[in-house]
Image: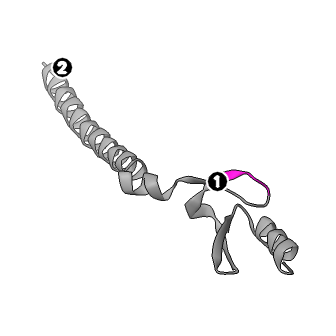
Amino acid sequence: MRIIPLLFYLAIFYLIYKFIRSLITNSLKNDENKNHDRRFSRSEAKSDDLIQDPYCKVFFPKNDGYPLKLDGKTFQFCSEKCRDSFYLDNKND
């Protein structure tokens, strides 16, 4: 006779466990979808276009660049080192 209440409580515990697990899983999936949408939105894709460093010729995302304004032109560089080297090579021109 004691086994029936035990089975009842085990069934209730299992249903509560499944319910909480589904809530957590759905929450994680929604967060992943939001991050995916954020990473691949059209506006961000355009702002993350690859450009070429004029000094070392490597390609990098435009948003990660180090700008330098020289003779009315704005140049983007992959690193501060490339930016400074380019400036030193071209400041006398």
Which quarter of the rendering shows the N terminus? top left
Secondary structure category for the residue under label 1 = strand
Q: Is residue 51 left or right of residue 35?
A: right
In this rendering, the answer to whether 31 lies above or below 3 is: below
Q: Residues within 10 Å of mark 2 (few under 14, many from 20)?
A: few
Q: CA distance from mark 2 to mark 1?
A: 67 Å
- Residue 52, quarter of picture: bottom right
Q: Which mark is residue 32?
A: none
Residue 29: give x, y in percent of width and height.
32, 41
Q: Is residue 92 left or right of residue 32?
A: right
Residue 19: give x, y in percent of width and height.
21, 37
- Residue 57 within the segment the image draws in magenta: yes
Which quarter of the rendering shows the C terminus? bottom right
Residue depicted at x 81% and y 67%:
81
* Overall secondary structure of the magenta section: loop
Give the residue at the far front of this rendering: 93
Residue under circle 1? 60
Secondary structure category for the residue under label 2 = helix
In magenta, the rendered stretch is 56-60
The foreground one among 29 and 14 is 29
Q: Residues within 10 Å of mark 1 (few under 14, many from 20)?
A: some
- Residue 64, quarter of picture: bottom right
Residue depicted at x 53% and y 53%:
49
Residue 34: give x, y in percent of width and height.
33, 50
Q: Earlier in the sequence, mark 2 or mark 1?
A: 2
Q: Hey, what amino acid is under mark 2?
A: Ile
Residue depicted at x 26% and y 35%:
17
Residue depicted at x 35% and y 48%:
37
Q: Which mark is residue 3?
A: 2
Q: Hey, what amino acid is under mark 1?
A: Phe
The foreground one among 46 and 6 is 46
- Residue 24 within the segment the image draws in magenta: no
